[in-house]
Image: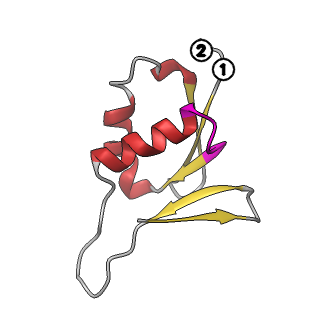
């Protein structure tokens, strides 16, 4: 997994690359938990989750005690931008 700061969108973007192999590489539960923790502690303000990783990301997200503190904004093409809110959403 590679992480880089996208200056255009001013947020962290997580990308997975599959070197020389056929097929996709998906986020693991451990990687998802790391991303969620970075949002919680303020290390990252926003993260972009790719369409192919959304279902696995959401499965882990809904199991979190502070699930209602996370806000996701769907973008054209299926990517979702997540951020952590100080107060629960309704």
Callout in the foreground (1, 2)? 1
Query: What residue sits right under mark 2 in the picture?
Result: 88
Q: In the rendered structure, does residue 42 fall within the stretch colored magenta? A: yes
Secondary structure under the numbered disc 1 in the rendered image: loop
Q: Are the two marked residues, 1 and 2, in contact with CB atoms closer than 8 angstroms? A: no
Residue with the most extreme top position? 90
Secondary structure under the numbered disc 2 in the rendered image: loop
**Where, quadrant-wise, is the N terminus in this rendering?**
bottom left
Q: Is residue 62 above or below residue 82?
A: above
The quarter holding residue 69 reads top right
Of residues 59 and 85, the one drawn nearer to the viewer in this rendering: 85
Near mark 1 (Cα within 10 A), the count class, few <14, some 14-19 or many ≥20, is few
Of residues 35 and 9, the one drawn nearer to the viewer in this rendering: 35
Residue shown at 55% from the left, 31% from the top: 40
Residue range in magenta is 40-46
Query: What residue sits right under mark 1 in the picture?
Result: 86
Label 1 to label 2, Cα distance in Å? 7 Å
The quarter holding residue 32 reads top left
Residue with the most extreme bottom position? 20
């Amino acid at each position: 997994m590679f992480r880089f700061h996208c200056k255009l969108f001013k947020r962290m973007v997580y990308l997975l690359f599959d070197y020389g192999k056929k097929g996709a590489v998906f986020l693991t539960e451990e990687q998802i938990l790391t991303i969620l923790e970075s949002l919680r502690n303020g290390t990252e303000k926003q993260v972009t989750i790719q369409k192919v990783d959304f279902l696995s990301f959401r499965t882990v997200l809904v199991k979190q005690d502070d699930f209602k503190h996370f806000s996701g904004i769907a973008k054209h093409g299926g990517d979702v931008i997540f951020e952590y809110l100080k107060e629960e959403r309704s």
